[in-house]
Image (cartoon, rainbow, N blue to C red):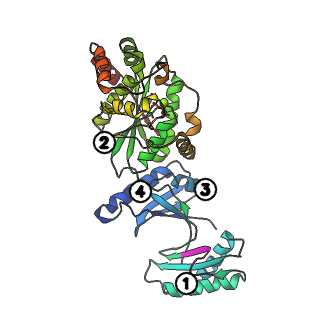
Amino acid sequence: MKFQTYLIKYGEIGIKGKNRYLFEDALVRQVKFALKDVEGEFKVYKSQARVYVDCEGYYDCDEVTEALKRVFGIVGICPVVRVEDKGFEELKKDVVAYMDELYPDKNITFKVESRRAKKTYPKKSMEMNADLGEAILDAFPEIRVDVHDPDVLLRVEVRDDIYIYSETIPGPGGMPIGTNGKAMLLLSGGIDSPVAGYMIAKRGVGIEATYFHAPPYTSERAKQKVVDLAKLVSKYTGPIKLHVVNFTDIQLYIYEKCPHDELTIIMRRYMMRIAEHFAKQDDCLGLITGESIGQVASQTMHSLAATNDVCTLPVYRPLIGFDKQEIVDIAEKINTYETSILPYEDCCTIFVAKHPVTKPNIGVIRKSEERLSEKIDELFQQAIDSVETIIVK
Ligand code: ATP
Ligand code: MG
């Protein structure tokens, strides 16, 4: 027996009321996207508060499951054996064969739960439960019924075909991408920012990204690493528009004009300003960073306030209360960790001071930035004009 259909269960949150169809349509879209590169033909459709994937031709069940496990909004994936309706006696045989194949050890309890989505089917669901249960009991002497807490809840659903299933594989939860606007992720080559993007995307938010590099101080390989990370995140989010900004001249200018212990903060403020420029240009409703309180000097409460000072869009920092190990655990789960720890230089690490301020005063920082007034507008414009935009998928 082979699973030919996947029944997809989604959460309750956000699906009630008149917007439910938006949620469902987005889910169907994201499921189709997730299956785009999986071998096989897939028909994805919604019906009666569920989404179904019918599989045709050659396909690998594990590959389909893996792809579905990356679609936000899915809480459960049920692999279904779909049989033609050839009469109730045939259905009994199919159900017995299903139990035999999926549960080789029969020292278990079970319960049958039938549902007639097709009301013309000659047997009522209560009757189906009893008769199918009996057929299973007759076939396997060791097996027992437990109607309250069965090991196996066997579901039989009569539609045009008959759907038999008993397993639910957990999905990632969250909301389908595209149900909650779009935000701009400041994506570096580190561990944190890909995780931050993943977490906001999980709530249904589409992701764009901005990466700052500093050639020739940072290499082409460092940039490629960020493209690779965006690609890994895009397995969950769909295609990501990545803005690659050449930050070298701004960094050098800050280095030349500003006190060195304030370099990182001032640099971070310019990153936020530039990312916000692209965010507004593309209708993003917020910025996302991988910052976490106290992780480094530029992420103390004072430093975060100083960085935040230049933003007019809300800045989402989903990792704000996480310890590094908690972030690493998620990075491993979403498969970005191995790429993140590749040892290429980051533009922030090149111009860092030995003793960066940990309690920057916003007034003092603003004052220091006045030293940049001669050329900074021009450099800012140049950085924006020379952006390289890559669609990563
Ligand atoms: P990460 O692991 O995400 O690189 P980090 O611990 O290295 O974070 P910082 O270097 O202080 O921390 O950066 C804080 C946040 O600023 C990052 O999570 C990211 O969102 C953003 N950021 C830092 N460097 C860059 C960069 N070169 N391009 C884009 N965003 C960046
Ligand atoms: Mg970093």
Three-letter code for the amino acid on which mark 1 is drawn: Asn
- Callout 1: 10 Å neighbours few (<14), some, many (20+)? some
Q: CA distance from mark 1 to mark 2?
A: 51 Å
Q: In the rendering, which numbered label is found on residue 62?
A: 3
Q: Is residue 150 above or below residue 216?
A: below
Magenta-drawn segment: 146-155
Image location (x, y in percent) of residue 239: 43, 42
Q: Residue, x 42% and y 16% (percent of image)?
A: 260
Residue under numbered circle 2: 285
**Residue at (54%, 75%) from the top-left corner?**
155
Question: How far apart, in angstroms, are the residues tagged by discs 3 and 1?
Answer: 30 Å
Give the residue type at disc 3. Asp
172 relative to 279, above or below: below
**Mark 2, mark 3: which one is toward the viewer?**
2
Q: Is residue 148 magenta?
A: yes
Amino acid under disc 2? Leu
Some atom of ligand 1 lies within 8 Å of the CB belonging to the residue at label 1: no
Quick check: can you spot residue 379?
Answer: yes
Main SS, magenta residues: loop
Q: Is residue 230 magenta?
A: no
Label 1 sits on residue:
129
